[in-house]
Image (cartoon, rainbow, N blue to C red):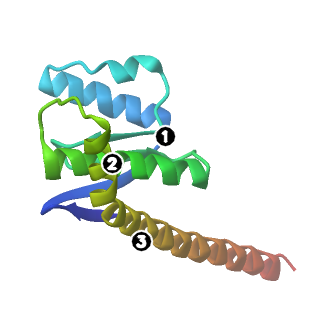
């Protein structure tokens, strides 16, 4: 799914743990920058601002995937709407970030999972129809 955050386009992709590690290693080789998150072995999600991609672990349960997407979108909001530099945030700044980003992030998450449910329903219907056809031709 494609989204936009303050005029910057992102694509949300669900990939396996193995595929993400391959993508990270390729990106680290291309950029010459090694990021330590690959070393931990497990990821829920990751925001690649330079490439405009948000990765989500495709095997996560829906509730964890939803929280992870919100988390990654918060990274995008901070990067695209506040600052690209590292900064220490006090409590008031964090509250402002949450208040200012909530509606934007919530709308993207709702749209993502609404579209995701439509695709799942379509896929389930396709599989059921395919199964019914196989039973029909089997007799």
Image quarter hosting the C terminus: bottom right
Residue 25 x/y as whole percent: 30, 25
**Residue neighbourhood size for the residue with mark 1, other residues' Cα within 10 Å, grouped as few (<14), some (14–19), many (≥20):** some
Of the two numbered discs 3 and 2 on the same chain, state the one appearing first in sequence.
Answer: 2
Give the side of residue 139 with respect to residue 34, left or right: right
Choose mark 3 or mark 1, whichever is in front: 3
The one nearer the camera, 112 or 92, is 92
Residue at figure coordinates x 61%, y 75% from the top left: 121
In percent of width and height, residue 72 lies at 35, 46
Circle number at residue 43: none
Residues at discs 3 and 2 in contact (Cβ within 8 Å): no
The residue pinned by badge 2 equals 95
> In the figure, 80 relative to 43: above or below?
below
Is 77 left or right of 123, judged from the image as shown?
left
Question: Are there few (<14), some (14-19), or many (20+) residues within 10 Å of tag 3?
Answer: few
Q: Secondary structure at mark 1?
A: loop
Q: Secondary structure at mark 2?
A: helix
Residue drawn at x 68%, y 75% is 130
Query: Of the numbered discs in the image, which one, if any, rests on residue 16?
Result: 1
* Residue 51, image quadrant: top left
Q: Quadrant of the N terminus?
A: bottom left
Q: Is residue 131 above or below residue 5?
A: below
Within the image, what quadrant is residue 22 found in?
top left
The residue under the point 23% across, 18% down is 34
Q: Secondary structure at mark 3?
A: helix
Crowd tier of the residue under label 2, counting other residues whose Cα lies within 10 Å: few below 14, some 14–19, many 20 or above: few
| Residue sitting nearer the eye, 19 or 76 | 76
Residue tagged 3:
111
Whole-number angstrom distance, CA of label 3 to CA of label 2: 24 Å
């Amino acid at each position: 799914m494609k989204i936009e955050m303050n005029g910057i386009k992102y694509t949300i992709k669900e990939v396996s743990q193995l595929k993400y590690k391959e993508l990270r290693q390729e990106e680290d080789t291309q950029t010459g920058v090694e990021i330590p998150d690959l070393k931990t072995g497990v990821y829920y999600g990751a925001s690649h601002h330079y490439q405009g991609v948000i990765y989500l672990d495709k095997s996560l349960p829906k509730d964890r995937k939803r929280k992870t997407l919100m988390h990654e979108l918060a990274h995008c909001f901070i990067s695209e709407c506040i600052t690209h530099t590292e900064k220490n945030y006090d409590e008031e700044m964090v509250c402002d970030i949450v208040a200012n980003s909530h509606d934007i992030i919530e709308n993207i998450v709702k749209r993502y999972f609404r579209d995701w449910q439509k695709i799942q329903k379509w896929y389930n219907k396709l599989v059921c129809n395919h199964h019914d056809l196989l039973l029909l031709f089997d007799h």
